[in-house]
Image (spheres, rainbow, N blue to C red):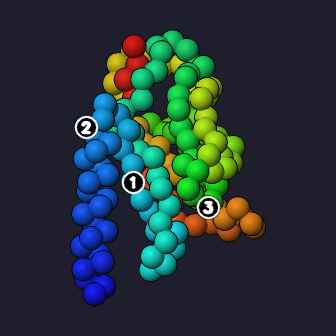
Amino acid sequence: MNKISNILAAFLILALLLTACGAGGDRVERFAEVAPGSGENIAIPGYEKLDFAAGKTAQTVNLKNPPENACTFVLALTLEGGETLWTGEALSPGEAFTRITLTKALDAGEYPATLHYDCYTIEDNTPLNGAEIQLTLEVK
């Protein structure tokens, strides 16, 4: 029975990924286990790309913590090689960052980057599993 449940869960996740990709573009829903072997999931919004304005540190985004999560997120955006462009404050379920300020302005071009998700319990800020989403920054 457990094997069937795992296959069904994998199928549902694949269906969600395909639906998100086909719906327009750069957002893909992913999941991380709350703790190894717990069977509980955290919904992790993933992105294939983020569009940024060249020559500016202030950027418009939509980085959110889905309302169904029972944890907070701390997000960080780094360039390939590890340079941190931005780190956010704790983000509660249902909240989103819509404007961020980068540590430096970027020239026009494409940049490989990683969006890091650190997840914590709401009650006592205990660390949970997180995720790293590889993406491209399209700077125009």
Q: What's the amino acid at mark 2?
A: Gly
- Marks 2/3 in contact by CB < 8 Å: the verdict is no
Which residue is at the front of the view, 27 or 36?
27
The image's mark for residue 70 is 3
Q: What's the amino acid at mark 3?
A: Ala
> Eyeballing the image, is 5 above or below 93?
below
> Eyeballing the image, is 40 above or below 67?
below
Q: Residue at 30%, 85% (x, y): give it.
A: 2
Judging by the rendered image, the residue that carries numbered circle 1 is 30
In this rendering, the label closer to the viewer, 1 or 2: 2
- Which comes before the other along the chain, label 1 or label 3? 1
- Which comes before the other along the chain, label 2 or label 3? 2
Where's the N terminus, which quadrant? bottom left
Q: Residue at 39%, 54% (x, y): give it.
A: 30
Q: What's the amino acid at mark 1?
A: Arg
Judging by the rendered image, the residue that carries numbered circle 2 is 22
Q: Name the image quarter holding residue 69.
A: bottom right
Q: Residue at 49%, 39% (x, y): give it.
A: 78
Helix, strand or loop under label 3 = loop
| Residue 11 makes an appearance in the image | yes
Which residue is at the front of the view, 122 or 89?
122
| Residue 118 makes an appearance in the image | no
Spatial CA distance of label 1 from label 3 is 16 Å
Label 3 environment density (alpha carbons within 10 Å; few <14, some 14–19, many ≥20): some
